[in-house]
Image (tube, helix red, strand yellow):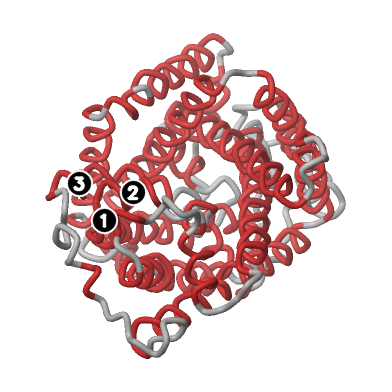
Amino acid sequence: MPVGNHSAHGQAVQDGPLKRELGERHIRLMALGACIGVGLFLGSAKAIEMAGPAIMLSYIIGGLAILVIMRALGEMAVHNPVAGSFSRYAQDYLGPLAGFLTGWNYWFLWLVTCVAEITAVAIYMGIWFPDVPRWIWALAALASMGAVNLVAVKAFGEFEFWFALIKIVTIIAMVLGGIGVIAFGFGNDGVAVGISNLWSNGGFMPNGVTGVLMSLQMVMFAYLGVEMIGLTAGEARNPQKTIPQAIGSVFWRILLFYVGALFVILSIYPWNEIGSQGSPFVMTFERLGIKTAAGIINFVVITAALSSCNGGIFSTGRMLYSLAQNGQAPAAFARTSKNGVPRNALLLSIGALLLGVLANYLVPEKVFVWVTSIATFGAIWTWVMILLAQLKFRAGLSTAERQGLKYRMWLWPLSSYLALAFLVLVVGLMAYFEDTRVALYIGPAFLVLLTVLYYALRLAPKAEQGVASTAS
């Protein structure tokens, strides 16, 4: 059955279904690119400050939780590959309100993240062109990524592939160069640096277990975006093959890129000096004698921000399209162009981003910190909904259906409960620390507002008509 050829009322509301044009290489690189953001290149300095070298443990623990969440999403996405992914699964297995909250919350989460990324592009372009007003770069970034998304899903996939490749090549070069410094003394007059910096400045865990716990919420925010693989299910050429492969490779690549990069950086430089002299990536390349290191990393950071913006526009468009299909957004957003792109949904998202960019230049910093807090809370809400939907999905299958699953969750249901407990711990930590507590005021308030809108606009009766599972 072509994905998305009906609305919640069963009427045809579009010119053609979404097109399955995302190949294996697109989805593999998207899976990786999604969780390698600007934060890694600019040094994860704040998280390192909290945990010291033990930050590597935080990334491994967080990575294991993400692996379980992605495995849960993969089980449902392979069984029923639809465009709205976790919003649709929340609706099918947890009820229409859960689907509505998850979809709109995710749409807003990516708008916020995109505004931050577009602003980052403007700031880093300003390093090269200090006389050009920042808003011009912000607008150029939004216009170019918006255009890529409006052309065809294949254009989006192609851009994302190359953006991700640039990030990956840079990290591999840094890790290999760093190993050269550690083992062979490259850039250090042939004197091997060794790895004693991992324990010689107050120990491997200088701030104790508390430091590791404190860093967890920042580490989890770095993983935001990895669930985007689920949204590609409606447009993947062969979802039964490509999605399991992409998910299976995520954890190992997180280990290589995050933990590998941090291992090299923390071995070469004392942890308590990182962040005081700019990006550790720039410092490492300069140590290897690459004089243009700052320019190279600036270019990579700009592509990383554009990549995130590109993925964000894709995500918001697909989520709005799915909500419209389920009768939880105006039906016009369920239409696609002849190229199979949900144009109306994308145009609304791009318009909202324009307002966001404008607000970013007008509104004081404090408000922006609050809005990014909603994004952190929104990411955790999304992951919790994925785990709960998968628990309900699996529980509703007969023994024969369970045995017939092409891609299944490991150690079900224990792994799901452990991942849920971990996410509850992260929320508890956010409540404990003053800086992140604001997210727990604004995030739930936003969900309450959405719930009021849901009932006020009488979306519940419509949605319930379309709640029948479309599992194929």
Q: Which residue is mark 1?
A: 58
Q: Which residue is mark 2?
A: 47
Instruction: Verify CB contact (< 8 Å) between mark 3 and mark 1.
Output: no
The residue drawn where x is 25% and y is 69% is: 197
Q: Amino acid at mark 2?
A: Ala
Q: Which residue is mark 3?
A: 211
Give the CA separation, mark 3 to mark 1.
10 Å
The residue drawn where x is 12% and y is 50% is: 208
* Badge 2 density bin: few <14, some 14–19, many ≥20, Cα 10 Å: many
Q: Amino acid at mark 3?
A: Gly
Q: Nearest the camera: 100 or 112?
A: 112
Give the CA separation, mark 1 to mark 2.
9 Å
Q: Nearest the camera: 410 or 134?
A: 134
Q: Nearest the camera: 376 or 238?
A: 376
Q: Amino acid at mark 1?
A: Ser
Give the CA separation, mark 3 to mark 2.
9 Å
Q: Is residue 80 visible?
A: no
**Residue 189 image position (x, y, % from top left):** 42, 87
**Residue 207 image position (x, y, % from top left):** 16, 48
- Of the numbered discs 3 and 1, the one sitting upstream in the chain is 1
> Is the N terminus in the top left, top right, bottom left or bottom right quadrant?
bottom right
The residue drawn where x is 26% and y is 56% is: 58
332 relative to 388 in the view: left or right: right
Instruction: Verify CB contact (< 8 Å) between mark 1 and mark 2.
Output: yes
155 vs 191: above or below:
above
- Of the numbered discs 1 and 2, the one sitting upstream in the chain is 2
Q: Is disc 2 placed on a helix, strand or loop?
A: helix
